[in-house]
Amino acid sequence: MEAIYQYAWLIPVLPLVGAMLVGLVLISLNQVINSLRRPSAVFIISLMGAAMGLSFALLWSQIQGHAPYTRTLEWAAAGNFHLSMGYTIDHLTALMLVIVTTVAFLVMVYTDGYMSHDPGYVRFYAYLSLFGSSMLGLVVSPNLVQIYIFWELVGMCSYLLVGFWYDRKSAADAAQKAFVTNRVGDFGLLLGILGLFWATGSFEFDVIGDRLAELVNTGSLSNILAVLFAILVFLGPVAKSAQFPLHVWLPDAMEGPTPISALIHAATMVAAGVFLIARMYPVFEHIPAAMNVIAYTGAFTAFLGASIAITQNDIKKGLAYSTISQLGYMVMAMGVGAYSAGLFHLMTHAYFKAMLFLDSGSVIHGMEDVVGHDPNLAQDMRLMGGLRKYMPITATTFLIGCLAISGIPPFAGFWSKDEILGKAFEANPFLWGIGWITAGITAFYMFRMYFVTFEGEFRGNKRQIWQKLKSPEGMAIATGFEGVPAFGPGAMTKGELEATTAHHHDDHGHAHSEYPHESPWTMTLPLLVLAIPSILIGLVGTPYANYFEEFIFPPSETLEEVVEKVALFNPSEFYIMAGVSVGISLIGITLASLMYLWGKINPVAIAAKIKPLYELSLNKWYFDDLYERVFVIGLRRLARQVMEVDFRVVDGAVNLTGFFTLVSGEGLKYLENGRVQFYALIIFGAVLGLVIIFGVT
């Protein structure tokens, strides 16, 4: 068994080798590699499969009780400073390796069907493999410096993949937005890492935590500085895991192909932020102020994402705001000290959210044969409806995902979300209240998406509805309430009408079917596989037998303490908390059914009565508009002012110096003519001048 650990470094290296070899051939022999599309995909998928197999072996070994394993070599040294690089395998690493490799492997299989006709098929696989390798390298990193290196590699890969269709302006803009927003958080993370090294003299997680706590307790380090360093480190996860106020990049990241949306939102980029909080838990848990910041940031983000998701038309953007909300739950759990509950929800969410995104890709793939390749139409839920009849596998797995994320037992999301809410109630009832309300909103918007997309009558082949999308009726088109004008959950935002009009006539020629169809087996098989953990994986963390918590527990606790705590399970308390959380979810599902399935409640009329709140949600709480005015337009104005200063002051000073040199040189060349008589004349004039001056005085 020890040999497995000695070769654990192969897990991030295998996908890296695949990306490197395919990438080099793409650069040197582009036509050859593009003629071997399927063999290239099989090669990359096989390497990820090998990494997945090794990851499962390591997880099994850790479950069996193998001690954590760390292997490092000295990378840099200067005096007393020594920096090592290598890899570490412990319970947290083993779990994350399995999550990342399984989701990445299934996404790669799915990609073969989804991207089969895309000219960038091979390039996309190379990017996917590099992305997976970067995340795996981050997971096995034994210190903060190595984590930061792979952290930036993950950001670079997200830039490449979000902007994969770089000839589309919206995709290029989304990639830049993701890159710039993450730079803000990453700069804070870098400052925090340097601050912690200055204070503790180490980049090792457990050493930093112990020394920082000791320094604060002895008064050697100000508590304010410790809080500042912790919050600066937290800025990294705020950006990567799309927490308020750096959440704005994640919905726009939907401009990338759907497989990468699934990978970003489930197991790689956004998971990296929660993983870093878990790794840095020895630092955060000793700083209550930082823990409060983390908890309240997560709670507000959870509510923010859910409140925006209820008015989305685009099926992928609805799921994107759902991801923001669920990540808020995980971060809130970390902030209230529910370490294992946050990681448990990270695991369950990875599987059902990957499935939901791949389901949305399957829906888009089927809709493109009806409405063409215009994403404004193919992703618009108002043109769907009745898809369960034509896409039964996609519909069934999407319904499973909705039940899981809504917290309906016995699906996976129930056990992890209920544990978070229970821990939050113990720590802070106010945070529990926010999480509880968010759970109800989550159930409402997820089943709104399901009913509008898969139930009722198919609307995509009715060309007159395409024209109605230009009207402000919004979701009234889908719910049968067209008579009430102007408002409705899902009405068009400012600028969306123009976008739809601009693309409306471009791709209709590509549509060649009256009805959508089920996706090929390469796309449906990953959906069926992901449905299994979406239903069952929560059973490893039930309060009756919480195997997950016994395996994953905070670094500050011992296994004996965890087992003793798990043994104190109170059934009556669990039934009350679970009943309350399931109850609010059932209310949300019932409201969605009355509005979007049975048509008993008019959502358009409700939206008209609460117009300010409705428009707040529809316009994403105006954060994009605010950032556009303050940062984009404001920084451009500042840049122009700086340019004026540079042109008039800096360049002016340089130009004035040059002009003065030129003029003085021109004047001096007449004085320096080499004639002795002229020099004698100058001396005579100078002497005469001095005589006159002194004579007068």
Image (cartoon, rainbow, N blue to C red):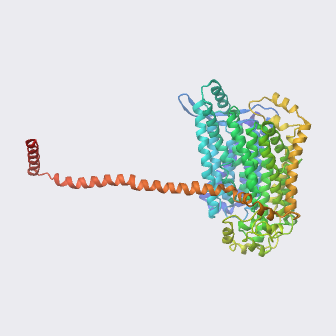
Count all numbered tags in the image, as a single digit.
0
Residue closest to the far top: 218
Which one is nearer the viewer's eye here, 53 or 408?
Answer: 408
Between 421 and 79, the residue placed more toward the observer is 421
Q: Is residue 231 visible?
A: yes
**Residue 553: quadrant of the picture:** top right
Q: Is residue 169 above or below residue 260?
A: below
Instruction: Residue at 64% x, 43% y: name it.
Output: 235
Which residue lies at the image location 39% right of the left edge and 55% below the top edge? 648
Residues 433 and 510: in front is 433
The image quadrant where one finds the N terminus is top right
**Apparent side of residue 665 relative to residue 180 in the rendered image (left or right):** left
User: How far across and how far down the image is residue 81, in percent?
Assistant: 56, 30
* Residue 243 percent across, percent down from the top left: 69, 47
Q: Residue furthest right?
A: 572
Q: Is any part of residue 522 visible from this angle?
A: no
Can you say which quadrant of the picture contains the C terminus? top left
